[in-house]
Amino acid sequence: MPSVTEISDAFVDAFAALDPVRASRSMGIGRDAEHLTDYSPDGAAAAGDLFRKTLADLEGATPADESERLGKAFLAEVCGGEAALIDAGERGRLVSHIIGPQASVRMSFDLMPRTTPEDWRRVQARLRAVPAAMEGYQRSLTESIEAGRPPSARLIRAVADQCTTWAGSGDGGWFGAYVAQYGDGPERPRLDDAARAAAAAYGALSRWFAEDAVDRATVEDGVGEERYQVWARDVLGADLDVGEAYEWGTGELARLEAEKAEECERILRGAGFDAVRDHLDTAAEHGVEGVDAYRSALQELVDEAIDALAATEFDVPGPLRVCPVAIPPEGSASAPYYTPPTEDLAQPGQVWFPTMGRTHFTMWNEVTTAYHEAVPGHHLQLGTTRLVPLTRAHRLGFNSAHGEGWALYAERLMDELGWFRTPATRLGFLCAQAMRAARVVIDIGLHTARPIPGGLEGAGEPWTFERAVVAIGRAGALPEADATSEILRYLSWPAQATSYKLGERSWLAGRAAAMAASGAGFDRRAWHGRALALGALGLDQLEEELGSCS
C-alpha cells in the first residue's frame, strides 16, 4: 500500500503530464514542457480517472505524520472537487475569458523560459501543439452542446472577441509578437511559421464561436443552485449555505459602504463618493502617465512592502524578496493576478497588472491590490508554502478560499498596520473590500436567481447582467470595462468570486480563536508563520487548524 507521500508524488507527476498548462501556472512545474493539455473529451476522461484513482488510493492510506495528515486532507478535497466538476460536465462546457483553455494556453507561454536556443526550440514545439489543443476544446464544447449542456451566449461572444484580439489579421497576432522576442536567429522562420499556425487556430476558434456555437448557446447567464453547489465545493472546500452567505455578504457590503462614506468626508467634505472618485481619478497627484511608469510605481510598492515587513511582521526568506511586476497583453481579463514561483524557486513568483488599453493610471486604488498580490499576500503565502515540509501536491497546491482569503486578510492586516497612509489610499482599500463583499452578493444572486437585497439599486427585483455591472462598478470604483470583465468572470467561474470574503472570514475567525486561546501572550508574527506553514486547506478544515496555531 503506497504512503500518502508516495500518492502525492505520483499525483503531481501524473497531473503535470495530463494538464501541463494548469500545472505550469498553478504549481510552477512543467513550464518548459513541449506539449499542451488535451482539452478534448478524452482528455477530460483521463483527468477524471486520475482524480478518482487518487481518491481511492488515499482512502486506504494511513498518515504517518502531521505532514501526511494535512496532505491527505488537501489532496482528497482537490480530487473530490475536480472529479465532481468533470462528472457534472462542467469542465466540458467551460467558456471563460479568464480560466478557459484559450486563455490558459496563451498565458502558459508567458511563463516559458526563453533564454537559450533549447528554450526556443521548446517554445516552437508548444506553439505547434496549439491547433490540436484548440480543436480538442472545440470538440468538448460540441459534445456538451449536443448533450444538452450549452454554454452561455454572453460568454461565447466575450471569448470570441478575445480570440480575435490574439489571432491578429494574418500576421501571427499575439503569437507573432511573442516569437519576435527571439530576434533574427536561425530558428526565426520556423518560429514565425509556428506562431502563424497558433494564431490561425485562435482565429478559427473565434469564427466557430461567433458563427456556430453562439446560435446553439443558452441565453441564461446563471447556472442554477445545483450546478453552483458543485462549483462551490471545489473552490471553497466546503458545502456552502447559500442563503446565509448571501445575507452575510449583504451586511458586510453595507458596513463597508458606510466606512467608504466616512473616508470620503476626509477627502472632500460633503462631496459624496461619486464626486470623490472623479476627483481622485483626475487629480494629477493621484495618477501616473504611461505603462512603464505604472509598472514602475507598482514595483516600488511591492519592493517597499517586502523590505519593511521582512524586518517587522514576517519571516521572508531570501528567495521571496524578489517579486517582479509585469504587464500582460491586451485581451487579458481586467483583474490583476499572481503566478507562483517554480517548485525549486529558480523562477520567482510574479504579479501581473492588465492595462485594458489605458495610458493614464490612478494609483489611489492600486496600493491595496499590490499588497494582495505580492507581500503580504499571494507571493508571501505561496512562496512560504514552497519552503515548508509538506507533501508535494500540498506544497504546490492551491485552494481558492484559502489563498484568496489570505490575500484579502493581508490587505486588512496592512490597514491594521497603518500602511494606507492617506485617506485616498485607505478609500482604495475600502473599495477593494467592498468589491469583494459585492462579489458574494452578485455572484450568488446572478447564479441562483435571488432578488436584489435591500439597500441596493433595484432592491427586490431580479439581478441582471447590466445591474450587476453597475453594482460592482460602484462598490469597487471600477471603470465600466473593468466592471464588465468582472461580471463575465463571475458568470464563467461560479462561486469563485465568493472565495475572497468567505475565505477572509475564516482567516479572521481562526486568528480570533488563536488570540482567545493565547490571551496576552498571543504573538502575531509567530501565528502567521505557523498558519502559513499549514499549506492550502478547504474552509471546512481551515478555521479549526488556524485556531490551534496559538
Image: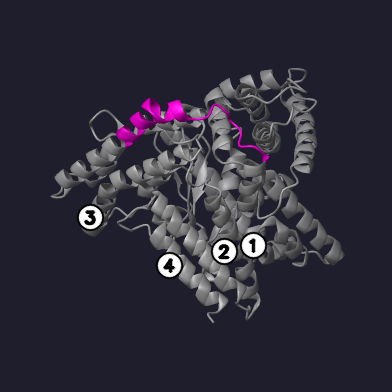
Q: Please tell me whether residue 198 is drawn above or below residue 539 in the rendered image.
A: above
Query: Residue under circle 3?
Result: 121
Query: Residue under circle 1?
Result: 532
Task: Give the CA distance from mark 2 to mark 4.
Answer: 19 Å
Task: Give the CA distance from mark 2 to mark 3.
Answer: 32 Å
Instruction: Classify 10 Å Cα crowding around label 1: few (below 14), some (14-19), many (20 and above).
Output: some
Residue range corresponding to the magenta coloring: 202-225
Q: Is residue 514 left or right of residue 537?
A: right
Q: Is residue 131 left or right of residue 239?
A: left
Q: Secondary structure at mark 1?
A: helix
Asked whether disc 2 touches disc 4, contact meaning CB atoms under 8 Å apart, the reply is: no
Query: Residue under circle 2?
Result: 385
Which is nearer the N-term, disc 2 or disc 4? 4
Q: Secondary structure at mark 2?
A: helix
Is residue 18 visible in this depiction of the protein? yes
Residue at the image position 49 percent from the left and 58 percent from the top = 48
Which is nearer the N-term, disc 1 or disc 3? 3
The amino acid beneath tag 4 is Asp
